[in-house]
Amino acid sequence: MRIRATVAAVSGALALSALAVPAVQADEKPDAGLSVPSGADVFASESGAPAAKARAASAAETPVIKKVVVNGGKDIVVGTQSKKKFTIVVTASSPSGIADADAYLWHGHSDEVDGFIGTEQAAKCKVSANPTTSTCTVSITVDPRSDDLYTSSLAGTWKVAVGALADTGSAYDFIWNDIQAKTRVQRFSKLTVNASPEPVKKGKTITVTGKLTRANWDTNTYKGYTKQPVKLQFKKKGAKSYTTVKTVKTSSTGTLKTTVKASADGTWRYSFAGTSTTPAVSAKGDFLDVK
């Protein structure tokens, strides 16, 4: 039995629903909503259904979700054109084992969901050494050119909804958690640098320019990231690491410009630490020859 994760438009707003109901019992399924109680609770309330009475009389088997890992523990970074593939790995257990699992990402609040990232593909589950436990992998592809990420305001923290179904042969033995974990979906960033003039005499002033941009999901283009602190760093020829010289803020268009004295041959670069919506990035270094 596949646990379905769907998004539906209700009164002009998005609502999430988690359904684990056989097609032959569709008339008994709970109303769509973010908080879906366990199958035993839902169907036991249907006093007129003999099957529900029989199920209520026996003990329900509720799986336990032990671990959830999104994108290998890393932030999900999406640009403007290329599709981004990632996985949600769910480890769950139940006395009878695990038959299936599902997971998706959603953004917003329970009464105003404005973003959804999921898939209709079934999870791939693998039984561990302990037969009561399985690790199920849900593979998801995000396309910035689709409705997955229709506006840049969706960048930041997303909730992770996760469900698991016990291998009892019954669709009632499942667990669903709308906020099992959290992850970040970020706007891909780019950073450039140019040190000039070149070559330059020792002690003379050089100008180091650059630009910090990030993906704009509204227009599928890259726009300047404004008013952000960026470190200007230098690596002397023969050295193994960079040292920070100063911090420069980006302009209203994301550009960078500052001046320093040329002291030795070496490589200059700008380095951005990142924010909750935008990943860290360092420019490819520009080597400057000092005479």
Image (spheres, rainbow, N blue to C red):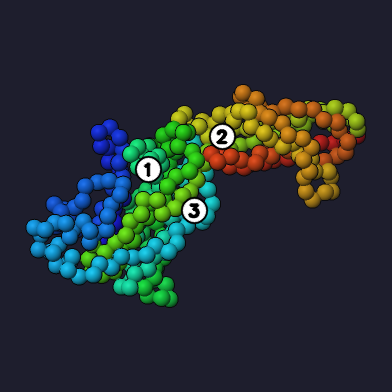
- What residue do we see at 13% from left, 52% from top? 27
Whole-Å distance between the Cαs marked 3 and 1? 16 Å
**In this view of the protein, can residue 268 be seen by the observer?**
no
Image quadrant in which the C terminus is located = top right
| Local SS, label 3 | helix
Q: Residues within 10 Å of mark 2 (few under 14, many from 20)?
A: many
**x and y percent of residue 104 in the render?**
38, 50
Is residue 45 toward the left or the right of residue 204 in the image? left
**x and y percent of residue 268 in the render?**
77, 38
Q: Which mark is residue 68?
A: none
Would you identify the image quadrant in which residue 100 lies?
bottom left
- Location of mark 3 (residue): 71
Report if the CB atoms under discs 3 and 2 are less than 8 Å apart.
no
114 or 290: nearer the viewer: 114
Is residue 181 toward the left or the right of residue 73 in the image? left
- Location of mark 1 (residue): 116
- What residue do we see at 39% from left, 44% from top? 106
- Location of mark 2 (residue): 214
| Local SS, label 1 | strand
